[in-house]
Amino acid sequence: MSYEKMTEYVESLFNVFNMINENESVKKDRRFQIIALVIFNYVRKMAKDNNVDLKEVVIKKPINLMPVFEYISHNNIQLYDFNTIHLEDVDVTRNEDLERYVLTHIYYITQKAKADAAKKGQI
C-alpha cells in the first residue's frame, strides 16, 4: 500500500535535513555530520524513487512534521529506543532497518529541537 502524501513526506524530510545541516553544533560534531549525511542519502533515495525534485522543495520554518508521523503510522514503523538499542539491532543491509534508523533520528532530533524551543519561549 503506497503512501499518498509522498511529496509532502519527502519535503518534510528535506526540511529536517536542512535544519540539522544548518545547525552550528552539527558542524562542530562529527557524529551529527554523519547523521545528517545518512538522513540526506535517505531523502535523496526517497525523492528519486518517488519522482520528487529536491531542487523544487521550499524550505519552511516551522517544519511540517505531520507527513513524517503519518508515514510512520501508515507503514507501521516501530522506531528504535536509543536508550536500549544495540549495534546488532540494525542490519545496514536491510532497507527497512535503515529507514527505521533514519526516522528514529529524525524523531529524536525534531522532538529535542521542539523541547529546546519551548524552553526558550519560541513556541
Image: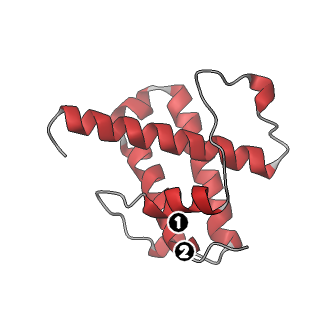
Question: Which quarter shows the N terminus?
Answer: bottom right
**Could you tell me which residue is drawn at 77 percent across and 30 percent down?**
89
Q: How many marks?
A: 2
Taking 103 as reference, is 53 above or below it?
A: below
Question: Where does residue 9 sit, x and y in percent of width and height?
Answer: 53, 66
Relative horizontal placement of residue 116, taking residue 5 as reference (left or right): left
Kind of residue sitting beneath label 1? Tyr
Q: Quadrant of residue 72?
A: bottom right
35 left or right of 97 in image: left
Left or right: 12 as drawn, with respect to 99: left
Q: Label 1's element? A: helix
- The colour mode here is secondary structure
Q: Residues within 10 Å of mark 1 (few under 14, many from 20)?
A: many
Q: Above or below — where is 57 with respect to 122?
A: below
Name the residue at 75% across, 44% down: 97
Residue 42: % across, % down: 64, 54
Which numbered disc covers residue 5? 2
- 6, 47: nearer the viewer: 6
Q: Are marks 2 and 1 in contact (CB under 8 Å)?
A: yes
Report the amino acid beneath label 2.
Answer: Lys
